[in-house]
Amino acid sequence: MRSIAANPYLLRTLVWALNSPFSYGYHIACLNQVQLALTCAKPPSSTGALSLPTCVPMSTNTFGLITSIFTIGGLLGSLVASRFMHRFGRKGAIKINASLICAGSLIMTIAWNTGLLALGRFLIGIGAGIAICVLPIYLSEVAPPKVKGSVGVFNQLSIVIGLLLAQLVGVYLSTPGTQRWRFVFLVSAALNIIQLLFSPTVSDTPSWLNAVGREQEAKAVGSKLWKDDSPTLASSTTTHPEEEGLLRNNDDEPPQSRRSETNIAPLTIPELFKLEALRKPVAAVLLAMFSQQISGINAVIFYSNDILSRVVPVESASYISLGIAVLNALMTFPAVTLIERLGRRKLLFGSMLGTLVSTVALAVGLNTGTPLLSSIGILTFVGSFAIGLGPVPYVLIGELVPFYASSPLSSTALSLGWVTNFVVGVGFLPLRDWLSRPGEGERRKGEGNVFFVFAGAFALCVVILSRLYR
């Protein structure tokens, strides 16, 4: 990591780019944090600055719809991200994502009705969908080969820091009866304006520049990124030892040479699945991304407030989600160094094993009415997920396939993530109720059964992935 700190140009490039996943994480959490201040049952009797209302009248269902529009926009953004990356470059796609998030944030800052809130949320979702597709590839293509995995983890680290900051900002700016909640969105707009203003100070990736025939510019950018007077494209696409088995096929061509073929026309999404040599790495990345969501991470976070409030003082319950966000961020930091020391595969499957055991512990704790065991299950789940299953699938997107297949794979993998996330979110509560039965008061007997289902599906993913990703 010293090589990054010692290279001001590389450091500036990374900081500039990482605002995009940061914004994605920020907007996942920020709307829920200001719900009490933003929403009201009746029109407010007074207005604040610019004659804007202190809250926006809406029902709980309407608020839920506005929240979910982010997912719809994210899916759309992921589907079109591949085309943007091909046509405008990695840097161009990042500028588009920053522009969309900035516009959406400004609209939500001045919104006085639900229509404007929904429009702003939708634009932010599209920008976020583009961001999480572009950044794994951008980071992989600008990172020095020796720390490519560590740099790739910065993507997930930025996401969880965004989540954490949204929680912190929400705690202090979600005061009912005031307009302070508007500053939550203004902060995001300001950060993305800064990103756009600084975009002339960074370049696109050497791989993309070389692919569009700008070889001299690619060499110059590579020299600044990697401190090499005469860098080659291969130096930016060095194959990690764990990747060679996935890229090897029956011919005699070494995987290293295939990865450096930036002169091959970029594939479309349908073409991605037609190449036999790419089927195994593509399947491995898609299954890893699917496993992220089928693990039940969002359901576990959903349950965290309810479960942990039973073992902590009532007055501290409002800070539970903030504590989970802190744990998620802290446990992502070790992955920055562990991914190079242990390797992608060991870190990923070690994390998945911890996640699986934690899910079972949570299920048993819920079914036996043992809040302490359930709490331990939640904390170890979040920690296990954050250290490997959270960051590694994003790293694999930019490493397991050649340049000409990375963009369509990123769009496909992240679109699958959005869809799986939506299905799990919609089906979680009905499945929980179907698998449990009424108990005393509001509690239901067998609440943990739904997590046994998650554990079973996740275990199957682990087994299949272990055969694909050797």
Image: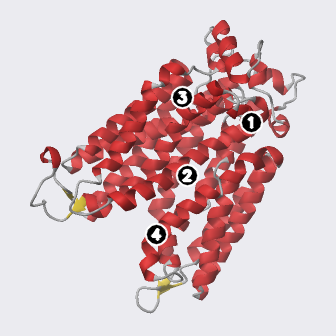
Q: Nearer the viewer, mark 1 or mark 2?
A: 1
Dot placed on the residue nearer the N-terminal end, 1 or 3: 1
**Residue named by callout 1:** 2
* Image mark for residue 319: 4
Seen as rendered, the residue at the extreme right is 252
**Residue named by callout 3:** 82
* Image mark for residue 120: none
- Measured in 3D between alpha carbons, the distance from the residue under mark 1 to the one under mark 2, in whole angstroms, is 23 Å
Dot placed on the residue nearer the N-terminal end, 4 or 1: 1
Amino acid type for the residue under numbered disc 1: Arg
Q: Is residue 400 left or right of residue 96?
A: right
- Measured in 3D between alpha carbons, the distance from the residue under mark 4 to the one under mark 2, in whole angstroms, is 17 Å
Up-down: is 292 above or below 379?
above
Do the residues bearing badges 1 and 2 touch, measured as CB atoms within 8 Å?
Answer: no
Do the residues bearing badges 3 and 2 touch, measured as CB atoms within 8 Å?
Answer: no
- Measured in 3D between alpha carbons, the distance from the residue under mark 4 to the one under mark 1, in whole angstroms, is 36 Å
